Amino acid sequence: MHTHLIAALLALAWPMGAMAAGAHDHSHGPVMNSAIGQPGDAAKVTRTVEVTLHDDMRFKPDTIQVKQGETIRFFVRNQGAVQHEMVLGTMAELKEHAEMMRTMPDMKHSDPNTVNLRPGQRGGMVWHFTQAGTVDFACTVPGHMEAGMVGKVIVAP
Ligand SMILES: [Cu+2]
């Protein structure tokens, strides 16, 4: 709930000029939108990016290049022996999320910017990168982000 509030605040704070840059998109997607983009339409996926999650607290790859306007299907596999997840967000959102996970470790989330996987499990999410810049991602299982389980999507204009 907190993360959504922050996303909304960030969206409000984002300069109007930057928002207009993506104005050619007339999709009827979900309302949620922010500096990091928005949940993507599976019918508009332009590319699939595979990401694996590992017990050495690393994403592979941990840097992903996309172009503004692309809709990416992340195909995520947990190759570790413990639970991991991939959450897209701003660094501030991710830190907030990690903090929440520490206080509520049993919290289940099905947010469209999150893939949470048990050992050996695989999953996916579709994300539309509407704005140029950097979108961070992290594993917010308690202790993992702090141990360096972070990465970034570089969105080229
Ligand atoms: Cu993890």
Image: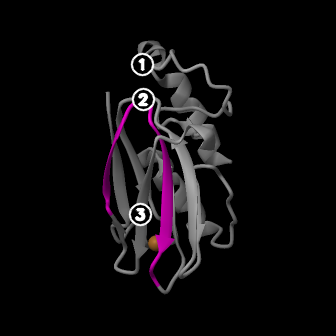
Dot 3 or dot 1, earlier in sequence? 1
In the rendered view, would you say 38 is above or below 110? above
Mark 1 lies within 8 Å of ligand 1 (Cβ measured): no
Q: Which mark is residue 18?
A: 1
Helix, strand or loop for disc 2: loop
Helix, strand or loop for disc 3: strand
3 and 1 marks in contact (CB < 8 Å):
no
**Picture coordinates of residue 127 (x, y %)?**
53, 43
Q: Amino acid type of disc 1?
A: Ala
Q: How many residues crowd mark 1 within 10 Å: few (<14), some (14–19), many (20+)?
A: few
Q: Which mark is residue 51?
A: 3
Mark 3 vs mark 1: in front: 3
Residue 106 visible? The answer is: yes
2 and 3 marks in contact (CB < 8 Å):
no
Dot 2 or dot 3, earlier in sequence? 3
Left or right of residue 26: residue 153: left
The residue at which mark 2 appears reads as 131
2 and 1 marks in contact (CB < 8 Å):
yes
Most foreground residue, 41 or 19: 41
Helix, strand or loop for disc 1: helix
In the rendered view, would you say 92 is above or below 141? above
Q: Residue at x 65, y 68 (%)?
A: 104
Q: State the extent of the magenta-drawn residues as a range.
A: 61-80
**Picture coordinates of residue 135 (x, y %)?**
40, 43
Marks 2/1: CA–CA distance: 7 Å
Marks 2/3: CA–CA distance: 22 Å
Q: Residue at x 48, y 19 (%)?
A: 19
Mark 2 lies within 8 Å of ligand 1 (Cβ measured): no
Q: Residue at x 57, y 76 (%)?
A: 121
Q: Residue at x 51, y 15 (%)?
A: 23
Marks 3/1: CA–CA distance: 29 Å
